[in-house]
Image (spheres, coloured by chain):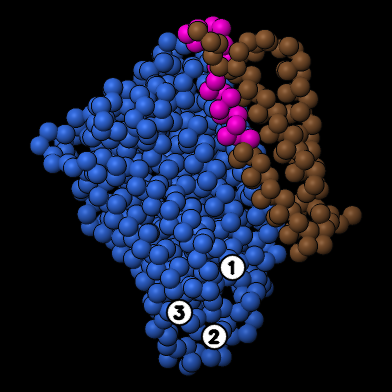
């Protein structure tokens, strides 16, 4: 940290993304439900502060901007040495995830101001706790703390998923909670097996110790890691563990869906973080453990997600199925285990998180104007032919004008389709290209079958998404029986537009962003600096250690 | 000692998994509770099993894992108990809501048509 002016309070910035929503969420619980304006102001202020803070932390982490020389900031709670105490670790990956959480949090919350906040009690508190759990999960450097933040995040998401109540939500929520409780138990079993063998819960310490684990204990450690992995993969929605995901995401309210859609990426984050850190090259005979499973599982998830995308008859289900496709793409790309591919995967994650959240918000606006059961009618029309208008109303069709609001929504929908399918000119295309190009760069001869399968899956899933989205798009915007026009308020349209504008910015500024992603991928695949940063003795009295 | 504990964990897990797969919400919640007992015992056992030892430290002796149980799993178990208690309570509320809304205690919210 030479030459970087830093006052003492700057050291404590790392924990602020957890503290702020905790305090604001607790405060909001005390405020009466009728003082909605005050609650909304506090909530939005906290979400904006979190976003600003995340961007600041991102700049601090990246300020060296010279290849692998990234700063790893370690915050030791209570200034205990990391062997005994709990650490928070901020590196490029966590900073990036914090920014994504901040963006989604702010846009979903602003969207909710129009009507969703009135749909039930304690929306704002739950939302703050959701942000707290997410930020904590991204910052922690300790396996058990990860569990605790997972639980905070999930508990808040149960509340948000059920927000607004209703039969469909309760029914889907019952499955969602039961599955996640079972997954949490698997998480605990995995963590305690790892602790039992290695004697540590600190991820960096674990990465050091794994090379020295006795051969007879190695099987037990790998079993523990695999059970832990299953818990993460349930969250990420890998086939065959992800059947709960489309159902849940379809029924929850739009702002909840937008913020909950990043929960599946938390599973992916945990896999990237722990798998690359612990089972990297330094892991002795365990190096690369389970990589093939990620790759194969990811490809199968893409296949299942693409079929689900094609088979769906409902906009919200379409978005749920595209969450599966993006999870599969990420898992497979990470499982490929190459630095450049991981960089592309991180770019893809950023792009798809923004697009999916935008789509969830957009769907609610579009659905608002449609007749109840319009989806079913559309399918019937397709199956039995149009029936009503073969030739008769040609003269009408020329002069049909599309109302302005439908045009705006339609363009936004098209942008989401391009982003999710990975077509030029938006960032989805760049992301897929960044995943595919390094794979082909090694020459086409020596490529293993799995790589070909991944490439085929990526391209075909794009095709499936295009087909499904254009079919639904035509149906919703052009061919639907005219219902009332959706009444959309600016405060609802603005977050969607912001998410899409960010995707455009991601496309325009692809160079610097991709540079950041590649640096991140490099430090993930060579985590010496992360390990050194955490293991370094704490500087007395500062409460943190920084690897220069 | 080890055998009894292992059998206990096994029986709890087995019955927990069986109940978790049953179609009634009450069975599911009891299954989840049994499973969490099993997991808590399992975490507890990773600290090592000893009878007649001091819980953490003995007066005038330096603590070492050779003579004492590892205290970390005990701390973990405490956290895990609290969390699973809270989430079970939440699930119970949802279970009652589902019963009230659907009029059935089937996990899918409707009876299977026979």
Q: Give me the residue at 53% from left, 23% from top.
A: B72
Element type where label 1 sits in the image = loop
Q: Earlier in the sequence, mark 1 or mark 3?
A: 1
Asked whether, in this view, residue A515 is left or right of residue A461, the answer is: left
Q: Chain of mark 2?
A: A
Element type where label 2 sits in the image = loop
**Which mark is on residue A105?**
none
Q: Is residue A543 above or below residue A375?
A: above
Q: How far apart are the two marked residues, 1 and 3, measured between alpha carbons?
A: 21 Å
Element type where label 3 sits in the image = loop
Q: Colour of chain A?
A: blue
Q: Tell me which corner region of the image, top left, top right, bottom left or bottom right, holds residue A46.
A: bottom left
Closer to the camera, A379 or B92?
B92
Q: Chain of mark 3?
A: A
Residue bearing mark 1: A120
Q: Give me the residue at 63% from left, 35% from top.
A: B81
Q: Earlier in the sequence, mark 2 or mark 1?
A: 1
């Amino acid at each position: 940290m030479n030459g970087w002016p830093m006052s003492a309070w700057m050291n404590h910035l790392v924990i602020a993304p957890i503290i702020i929503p905790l305090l604001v969420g607790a405060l909001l619980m005390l405020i009466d439900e009728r003082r909605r304006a005050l609650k909304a102001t506090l909530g939005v202020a906290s979400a904006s502060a979190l976003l600003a803070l995340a961007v600041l932390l991102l700049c601090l982490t990246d300020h060296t901007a010279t290849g692998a020389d990234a700063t790893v900031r370690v915050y030791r709670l209570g200034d205990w040495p990391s062997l005994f105490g709990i650490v928070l670790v901020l590196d490029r990956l966590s900073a990036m995830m914090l920014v994504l959480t901040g963006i989604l949090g702010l846009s979903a919350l602003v969207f909710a101001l129009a009507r969703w906040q009135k749909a039930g009690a304690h929306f704002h508190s739950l939302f703050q706790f959701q942000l707290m759990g997410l930020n904590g999960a991204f910052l922690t450097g300790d396996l058990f703390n990860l569990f605790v933040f997972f639980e905070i995040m999930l508990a808040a998401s149960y509340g948000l998923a059920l927000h607004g109540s209703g039969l469909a939500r309760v029914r889907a929520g019952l499955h969602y909670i039961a599955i996640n409780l079972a997954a949490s138990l698997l998480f605990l079993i995995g963590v305690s097996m790892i602790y039992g063998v290695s004697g540590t819960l600190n991820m960096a310490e674990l990465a050091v110790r794994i090379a020295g684990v006795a051969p007879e204990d190695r099987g037990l450690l790998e079993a523990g890691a695999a059970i832990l992995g299953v818990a993460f993969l349930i969250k990420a929605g890998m086939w065959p563990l992800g059947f709960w995901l489309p159902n849940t995401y379809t029924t929850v309210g739009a702002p909840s869906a937008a913020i909950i859609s990043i929960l599946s990426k938390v599973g992916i984050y945990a896999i990237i973080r722990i798998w690359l850190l612990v089972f990297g090259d330094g892991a002795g005979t365990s190096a690369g453990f389970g990589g093939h499973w990620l790759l194969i599982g990811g490809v199968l998830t893409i296949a299942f997600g693409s079929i689900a995308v094609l088979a769906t008859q409902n906009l919200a289900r379409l978005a749920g199925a595209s969450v599966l496709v993006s999870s599969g793409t990420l898992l497979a790309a990470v499982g490929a285990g190459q630095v450049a591919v991981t960089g592309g995967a991180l770019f893809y994650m950023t792009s798809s998180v923004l697009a999916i959240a935008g789509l969830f918000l957009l769907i609610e606006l579009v659905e608002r104007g449609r007749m109840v059961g319009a989806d079913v009618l559309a399918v019937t029309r397709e199956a039995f032919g149009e029936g009503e208008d073969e030739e008769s109303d040609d003269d009408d069709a020329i002069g049909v004008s599309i109302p302005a609001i439908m045009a705006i929504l339609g363009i936004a929908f098209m942008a989401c389709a391009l982003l999710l399918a990975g077509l030029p000119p938006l960032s989805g295309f760049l992301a897929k290209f960044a995943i595919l190009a390094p794979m082909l760069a090694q020459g086409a001869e020596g490529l293993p079958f799995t790589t070909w399968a991944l490439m085929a899956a990526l391209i075909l899933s794009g095709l499936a998404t295009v087909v499904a989205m254009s079919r639904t798009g035509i149906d919703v915007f052009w061919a639907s029986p005219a219902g009332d026009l959706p009444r959309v308020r600016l405060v609802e349209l603005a977050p969607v537009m912001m998410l899409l504008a960010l995707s455009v910015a991601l496309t325009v500024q692809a160079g610097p962003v991709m540079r950041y992603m590649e640096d991140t991928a490099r430090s993930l695949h060579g985590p010496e600096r992360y390990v050194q940063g955490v293991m370094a003795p704490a500087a007395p009295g500062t409460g943190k250690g920084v690897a220069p | 000692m080890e055998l009894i504990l292992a059998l206990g964990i096994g029986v709890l897990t087995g019955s927990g998994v069986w109940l978790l797969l049953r179609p009634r919400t009450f069975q599911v919640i009891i299954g989840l509770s049994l499973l969490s007992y099993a997991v808590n015992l399992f975490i507890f056992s990773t600290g090592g099993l000893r009878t007649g030892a001091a819980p953490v430290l003995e007066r005038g002796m330096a603590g070492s894992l050779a003579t004492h149980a590892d205290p970390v799993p005990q701390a973990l178990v405490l956290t895990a108990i609290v969390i699973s208690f809270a989430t079970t309570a939440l699930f119970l509320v949802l279970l009652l809501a589902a019963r009230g809304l659907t009029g059935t205690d089937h996990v899918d919210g409707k009876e299977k048509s026979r």
